[in-house]
Amino acid sequence: MNDLDHKEEVTHGWPSGLRRQTQATGFLRVMRVWVGEQYDSSARSSQICQTRMISTNMELRMELESDPVLKRG
């Protein structure tokens, strides 16, 4: 069976009208795909962000260490 043909079963705490609408549109399947893509892209970019944060922290530390006002404390 094709993934597009599969109907989502939504149960706990959902109004029946919303459950039927969700089954009709496949909304949850679409959202799972979208969230999965966002997760994949964020996982790929997390290393870049970590590298940026490390370099920014080093720059801030150097700036703070050279600040004469803070050294007086």
Image (tube, helix red, strand yellow):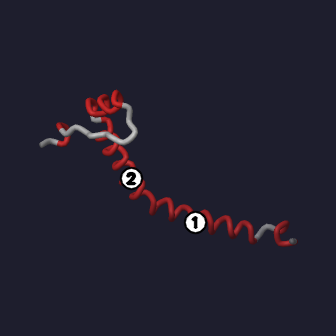
1 over 23 or under it: above or below: below
72 over 36 or under it: above or below: below
- 1 vs 45, left or right, is left
In percent of the image, x 82 and y 68: which residue is there? 70
Residue 55 has which mark?
1
43 over 6 or under it: above or below: below
Identify the residue position indicated by label 2 in the image. Answer: 39
Q: CA distance from mark 2 to mark 1?
A: 24 Å
Could you say which quadrant of the image residue 3 lies in? top left
In percent of the image, x 26 and y 30: which residue is there? 24
Residue lying farthest to the right in this orientation: 72
Pinpoint residue 67: horizontal percent, then vertical percent.
Answer: 79, 67
Residue in front for this viewpoint, 16 or 44: 16
Residue in front for this viewpoint, 27 or 68: 27
The residue under label 1 is which amino acid type?
Ser
Residue lying farthest to the left in this orientation: 1
Q: Which tag, 2 or 1, sits closer to the chain's start? A: 2
Residue 63 has which mark?
none
Pinpoint residue 4: horizontal percent, then vertical percent.
Answer: 20, 38
Q: Crowding at label 1, few (<14), some or many (≥20) Cα neighbours within 10 Å?
A: few
Q: Secondary structure at mark 1?
A: helix
In percent of the image, x 46 and y 60: which residue is there? 48
The residue under label 2 is which amino acid type?
Tyr
Q: Secondary structure at mark 2?
A: helix
Task: For the residues labelled 2 and 1, say whether their Cβ atoms are less than 8 Å apart.
Answer: no
In percent of the image, x 17 and y 37: which residue is there? 5
Could you say which quadrant of the image residue 72 lies in? bottom right
Residue in front for this viewpoint, 52 or 35: 35
Pinpoint residue 15: horizontal percent, then vertical percent.
Answer: 38, 32
Of the residues tagged 2 and 1, which is closer to the observer? 2
